[in-house]
Image (tube, helix red, strand yellow):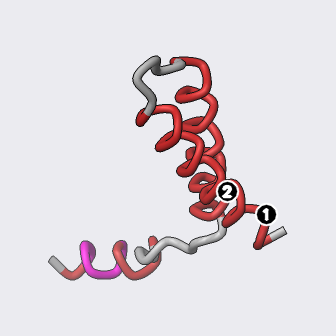
Amino acid sequence: MKYLNYILILVGAIVAIYAKTGANQNQYILIGGIILLMIGVYRISRNIPSKTNDDNDNSVNDSL
């Protein structure tokens, strides 16, 4: 499933670039490419943990 996200990003970027380069730009192909790109980025970003930790933030604020 991890590779599916990268494939979505790659295919979305290629489709968006392809739709943008033509003289007769097809808006629907461009939108479809951007949607694929954003779905891939969203699926990858869901798995990245947050850097902040609420427990550490509360203890620092209590000491001030």
Task: Please rate how many residues cluster around mark 1, counting C-alpha atoms within 10 Å: few if below 14, some from 14 to 19, many from 20.
Answer: few
The C terminus sits in image quarter:
bottom left
Numbered label attached to residue 53: none
Residue at 58 percent across and 72 percent down: it is: 48
Residue at 63 percent across and 60 percent down: it is: 46
Identity of the amino acid at label 2? Arg
Identity of the amino acid at label 1? Leu
Q: Quadrant of residue 47?
A: bottom right
Magenta span main SS:
helix
Task: Please rate how many residues cluster around mark 2, counting C-alpha atoms within 10 Å: few if below 14, some from 14 to 19, many from 20.
Answer: some
Q: Quadrant of residue 56?
A: bottom left
Q: Which residue is mark 1?
A: 4
Closer to the camera in the image, 43 or 62: 43
Residue at 77 percent across and 72 percent down: it is: 2
Per the image, label 2 sits on a secondary structure element best described as helix
Q: Which residues are magenta?
A: 58-62
CB under 8 Å between callouts 1 and 2? Answer: yes
Residue 13: percent from left, percent from top:
53, 50
Left or right, 45 with respect to 60, comes to: right
- Looking at the image, the residue that sits furthest to the right is 1
- Looking at the image, the residue that sits furthest to the left is 64
Residue 38 magenta: no
Numbered label attached to residue 43: 2
Q: Nearer the viewer, mark 1 or mark 2?
A: 1
Left or right, 25 with respect to 48, comes to: left
Instruction: Give the vertical position of 22 relative to 54 (above or below).
Output: above
Closer to the camera in the image, 8 or 49: 8
Residue 5: percent from left, percent from top:
71, 62
Residue 35: percent from left, percent from top:
60, 36
The N terminus sits in image quarter:
bottom right
